[in-house]
Image: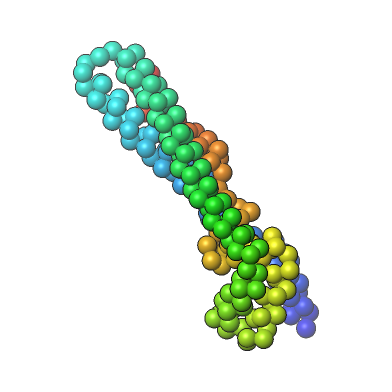
Amino acid sequence: MAIIETDAVLHEAHRDNHTHRDVNGGWLRPAVFGAMDGLVSNLALMTGVAGGAVSQQTIVITGLAGLAAGAFSMAAGEYTSVASQRELVEAELDVERRELRKHPKDEMAELAALYESRGVDAPLAREVARQLSRDPEQALEIHAREELGIDPGDLPSPLVAAVSSFGAFALGALLPVLPAR
């Protein structure tokens, strides 16, 4: 009996600490892309310049210039890309917000039908949809997750993406500069 109780306590203790990593890629994708791009493009740039039989100092300056130009370019591109994506998502959230305001019964029925399609009995699905629809922000969050596949409270940050991309590109681009100095 003590073993079973101990296992239950251990299971509960583990369950309280149950967490997941952020898999949305808000910073990881631009960081990996930036590091690889920095390494490859700056190595190619420096190799091409070195092929011209120039001084070591010229190769290093070329590498540093490639690092700066590429890092700023990657950051600007990533910022613009993520900001555009975020604006599109926010526009879709506005559409859903208007629908919830203008046609609350239709949206509630839509939510109930979704739960029914997942195996919830019709009366219970309608009741769950009714209860969840009482709070407009909660209703928006649920509709956004179910219809758009997004979490309105966890949209990617253009600044985080830009800084990640800048730093990763710079780090990748610095690697071929170090042995050249």
Above or below residue 10? Residue 60 is: above
Q: Quadrant of residue 174?
A: top left
Q: Is residue 125 visible?
A: yes
User: Can you tell which quarter of the image residue 56 is in?
Assistant: top left
Q: Is residue 137 left or right of residue 145?
A: right
58 up-or-down from 93: above or below: above
In depth, the one of 147 and 44 nearer the eye is 147
Q: Is residue 177 left or right of residue 136?
A: left
In the image, residue 131 sits, relative to residue 153, either above or below, namely below
Q: Work out whether 93 lies above or below 169.
A: below
Give the residue furthest to the front.
102
Residue drawn at 25 percent across, 21 percent down: 50
Residue 68 place in picture, x, y as percent:
42, 25
Report how many numbered discs are placed on residues in the image: 0
Q: In what quadrant of the picture does the N terminus appear?
A: bottom right
Percent position (x, y) of residue 4? Answer: 74, 80
Q: Residue at x 49, y 33 (%)?
A: 167
Q: Quadrant of residue 151?
A: bottom right
User: x, y percentage for residue 172?
Assistant: 41, 34
Using the rendered image of the protein, determine whether residue 177 is visible from the camera's viewpoint: no
Q: Which residue appears at 46% of the width and 47% of the height?
A: 29
Q: How is the image coloured?
A: rainbow
Image position, residue 19 (x, y; %): 64, 60
Q: Which residue is found at the position 56% from the left and 58% from the top?
A: 95
Residues 165 and 57: in front is 165
Left or right: residue 178 versus residue 163 is: left
Q: Quadrant of the C terminus?
A: top left
